[in-house]
Image: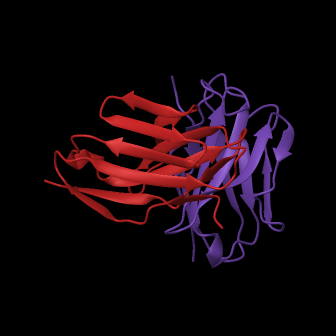
Chain colours: A purple, B red
């Protein structure tokens, strides 16, 4: 039973390039979340998606960042014109349904480490 | 004020001792609480979840929740070197997890 799959695990981009991070949720999970962890900081919520819908993007920076979860294929977090401050670990998570009730565990993927040089 | 605050570390305990981690949260409507363990360069791993006041035990781990005080704690009994990691406290109202900055625990052999 595969867990949450993220790729690439490590990505190096030059300033101004685009970064695309992909996430395939656990089998049977239709809810996807993206979190960002800056160096020496805790995880911060970015966006919550269901298939073809963005439910909550309140944690996304207003510019350069976008996310999607198409009907077919993985969820994509896209960062345009990357800057050094975007260097961080980006974690995708999934759950079978929304709500933090008992049994609705949110599982994290292994993360994608973005380095901007 | 941060939504979730954890006691500052790092915390160093000898092998076999009890490690005690504390966490407070500011959002009174939070309903679910979690402790994650994160090894350096790895993803967070859920070790405990707690939803109602009181204690919850799972092996060497005990979580305690006091909603009136907005306080969550985690005890690690018989600490092992493999417990050396950063422990993240998280609170959730619905789907959004709010994390503390983490407490780094080092278990000395």
Residue A64: where, in percent of width, then height?
Answer: 80, 67
Q: In the displayed structure, does residue A54 sit left or right of residue A46? A: right
Q: In the displayed structure, does residue A66 sit left or right of residue A45? A: right
Residue A32: where, in percent of width, then height?
Answer: 70, 39
Q: Is residue B72 above or below residue A38?
A: above
- Please name whichever residue, A78 or A93, is drawn nearer the observer in this view of the structure: A93
- Please name whichever residue, A43 or B3, is drawn nearer the observer in this view of the structure: B3
Residue lying at the far front of the rendered structure: B68
Q: Residue at x 34, y 50 (%)?
A: B20
- Please name whichever residue, A31 or B89, is drawn nearer the observer in this view of the structure: B89
Question: What count of labels does the image hold?
Answer: 0
Q: Is residue B54 above or below residue A39?
A: above
Dividing the picture into quarters, in which one does residue A28 lie? top right
Q: Residue at x 21, y 45 (%)?
A: B80
Q: In the displayed structure, does residue B25 sit left or right of residue B27? A: left
Residue A74 in sight from this viewpoint: no
Dividing the picture into quarters, in which one does residue B56 lie? top left
Dividing the picture into quarters, in which one does residue A62 lie? bottom right
Residue A44 in sight from this viewpoint: yes
Q: Name the image quarter holding the C terminus of chain A.
A: bottom right
Residue B2: where, in percent of width, then height?
Answer: 63, 64
Q: Residue at x 31, y 43 (%)?
A: B76
Q: Residue at x 62, y 77 (%)?
A: A84
- Please name whichever residue, A31 or B96, is drawn nearer the observer in this view of the structure: B96
Q: Is residue A13 above or below residue A75?
A: below
Residue B9: where, in percent of width, then height?
Answer: 38, 65
């Amino acid at each position: 039973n595969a867990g949450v799959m993220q790729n690439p695990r490590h990505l190096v981009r030059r300033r101004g390039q685009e970064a695309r991070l992909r996430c395939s949720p656990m089998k049977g999970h239709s809810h996807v979340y993206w979190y960002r962890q800056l160096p020496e900081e805790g995880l911060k919520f970015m966006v919550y998606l269901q298939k073809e819908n963005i439910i909550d993007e309140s944690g996304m920076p207003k510019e350069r960042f976008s996310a999607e979860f198409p009907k077919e294929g993985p969820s994509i977090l896209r960062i345009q014109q990357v800057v050094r401050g975007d260097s961080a670990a980006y974690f995708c998570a999934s759950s079978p349904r929304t709500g933090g009730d008992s049994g609705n565990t949110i599982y994290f993927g292994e993360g994608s480490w973005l380095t901007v040089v | 004020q941060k939504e979730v605050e954890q006691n500052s570390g790092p915390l160093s305990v000898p092998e076999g001792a009890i490690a005690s981690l504390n966490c407070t949260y500011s959002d009174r409507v939070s309903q679910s609480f979690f402790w994650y363990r994160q090894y350096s360069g790895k993803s967070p791993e859920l070790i405990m979840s707690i939803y109602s006041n009181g204690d919850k035990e799972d092996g060497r781990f005990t979580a305690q929740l006091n909603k009136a005080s907005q306080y969550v704690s985690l005890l690690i009994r018989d600490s092992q070197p493999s417990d050396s990691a950063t422990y993240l406290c998280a609170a959730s109202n619905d789907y959004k997890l709010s994390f503390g900055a983490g407490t780094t625990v080092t278990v000395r052999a």
